[in-house]
Structure formats: C-alpha cells, structure tokens
Amino acid sequence: METRIIGIFDSQQEVINEIKKYEAQGIDRSKFSVLAKDEGKTDYLTEKMDIDEQQPANEGAFGVLGGFFAGIGGGIAVPGMAIPGTGPLIAAGPFASALVGNNEDLRNMFLSMGNEELADRYIEELDAGKIILFLDE
C-alpha cells in the first residue's frame, strides 16, 4: 500500500469537499488521513466525517506514520505532537499510527513521497496553518 499526498488545504471544508469527491468515485473515507498543526482543525474533520474513535498518541513520539492519521479513517489523533522548528502537529486517519520515532520522521516521510524541495514545502505549509490530506492506495 502506498500513501500519497492529495493536496494542501486552507480549511477543513476544503478537505471535506475533496474527500467527498473521492467518495463519489468509490474510495472509502477510511483511506484518508490528515496532518495539521491546529488540533481544532483535525477535531472538526474527525467529527464532521463521523469518526467514532480518537485516541491520543504520545506527544514525544513524533512517529505517527504507519497507521498514519487515524481519525478520519478511524483510530488515532495525535494532539499536540511537537516538532522543533514547526510547533505541534495533529495527525488523524489511518496514516497516523505509522509515525513512530523521532523528530526526523516527518521530514523523512515527506522525503519518501518526493524530493527535498517538496519536503521543505510541506513543512512550511504546515507551519503556515495548512492541512495536508493523504490517501492510502
């Protein structure tokens, strides 16, 4: 299974609209994950998308990459996961449980999905308050 970035969004409603587009094509919402710095954004998304279960992850374990972002997909939210230089991150969805390790996990995750320039851009977007939407394929 491969996880890819679907897009970077300014608002929760934009993320919901994007997920609905994919659902109309037959893709199950449990395949989606989100990453954001603002816990309110991920809380809203998990609530709006009828997610039943949220469990806090260890803030020091900035590795939520494996079941990465179970909130939208049903499972884990990572409230206040701190990353030096970027601040806290919130992960929700099936991708959330995959991030396990140290503060290099986020950068390494993004590097595995593209090049160094893109990895830096994704981190900057998170720092600017954006929401990143992922899809497990």
Image: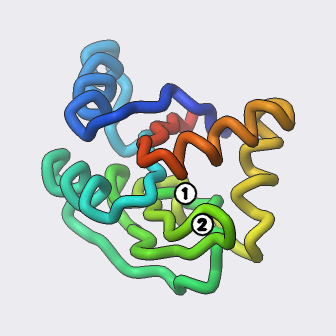
Nearest the viewer among 87 and 50 is: 87
Q: Amino acid under label 1?
A: Phe
Question: Who's the residue at 52% across and 74% down the image?
Answer: 81
Measure the alpha-carbon separation of dots 2 and 1.
5 Å
Task: Check the image and report above or below for 48 versus 65.
Answer: above
Image spot of residue 16 (x, y percent): 24, 33
Task: Check the image and report above or below for 77 versus 119.
Answer: below
Image spot of residue 40 (x, y percent): 25, 61
Residue 82, picture quadrant: bottom right
Nearest the viewer among 92 and 107 is: 107
Task: Check the image and report above or below for 98 versus 129.
Answer: below
Q: Which residue is mark 2?
A: 64
For the residues labelled 2 and 1, say whether their Cβ atoms are less than 8 Å apart. Answer: yes
Q: Which residue is mark 1?
A: 68
The residue carrying pointer 2 sits among few (fewer than 14), some (14 to 19) or many (20 or more) residues within 10 Å by Cα, namely: many
Single out the residue that lies furthest toward the top.
Answer: 25
